[in-house]
Image (cartoon, rainbow, N blue to C red):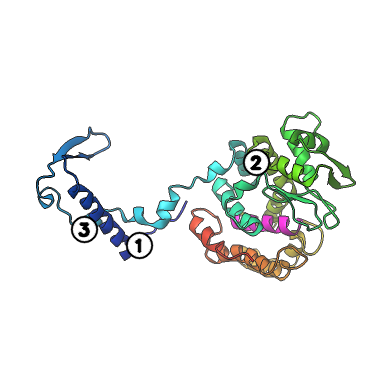
Amino acid sequence: MYKVSAKPVNNKMKFLVILLSFTVIASFSGLSSPLQSKVFADESTVPSQEYIDSSESLDDSYELNTDASLSTINEDLFSQDALAAAAINHDANFSPATLQFLKTNTGLDGEQWDNIMKLVNKAEQDELDWTKFYGYCEDIDDERGYTIGIFGATTGGSRDTSPDGPALFKEFDAASGASNPSIQGGLTRAGVKGTMSGSILKITDSNSVFVKKINALQKNATWREAMWRTFYNVYIKYSVQQAKNHGFNSALTIGSFVDTALNHGASGDSNSLEGILSRSGNSTNEKTFMTNFYAKRTLIVDTNEYNQPPNGKNRVKQFSTLLSSGETDLKNADAAVVKATSWIMK
């Protein structure tokens, strides 16, 4: 939820309220027939009605006192953060099954995961609405094959010889009820054609056909569930384990590790999450450790085609900014997340 401001209504808001009040008065004076107004004293009472004769002086029947009007306004209702909060339902971005799965396996709830995904998707797609990308599919010419879905699963290529795309299709087959899930079974359920060449998934459909087929899975509930299970198995599980190994369990730290793992790889070379953690020191103070972690990641995040400079540095800065402002649990932090992701992608 957005944090509710306790600040007084500013001059701009006062002007807006006064302007709206005069607009209402103007509409009253233009009526030639009796105007019906309803007075609601309480939600549990029956509304009473009174009529104002337009032939009477408006000043006699309706006295405007701008100071009094403003004094009766709940100032928090005019806070931009409060107004925005009313429209946010974090849990609505997940199925009940996914919410329970994430809570059980990561200890984080829908609000925390929604904010993590906003941070991830800003750097991946330059948008905060990450839910639009379940059916995303594109060959971005990075020698990793096709990039698919909310966490960028790949089909593999010369620069990605251990792709996670095959696991996604196998999980799709499993989530669809297959007794003996397989990659081929998942491809068939998606309506696409492809074969495995070692660890690489070779798509034999044309580019336009394959992309269209994956796009069509955007609202498929089983595909979404398979997406989260694969995301967890490949990146989230390892990230949560590493956070716990260091004695940390905050949403911001877990989110930082997940973002690093899917951007650089979970384990393996020195630039992976595993490699960066090994160079981040041994402090048991979470803020101290994560400050070191962000500094080490910043050194390599714009290298090896992980991100186009300076997007990588801004990607890390999102998390370090939230750490500095104390938003480690990512609860009631929507305004802070919006601010942290307001950088311009190059």
Rendering coords of residue 72 (x, y %): 24, 53
Q: In this view, does 27 lie to the left or right of 316?
A: left
Residue under label 2: 218
| Residue 280 makes an appearance in the image | no
Magenta residues span: 250-266
The kind of residue on which mark 3 rests is Thr
SS at mark 2 in the image = loop
SS at mark 3 in the image = helix
N-terminal of the two: label 3 or label 2?
3
Quarter of the rendering occupied by the C terminus: bottom right
Q: Along the line of sight, which residue is nearer the eye, 14 or 230?
A: 14
Rendering coords of residue 6 (x, y %): 36, 59
Q: How far apart are the alpha carbons under marks 3 and 2?
A: 51 Å
Residue under label 1: 7
N-terminal of the two: label 2 or label 1?
1
Q: In the figure, residue 257 lies in which quadrant?
A: bottom right
Residue under label 3: 66
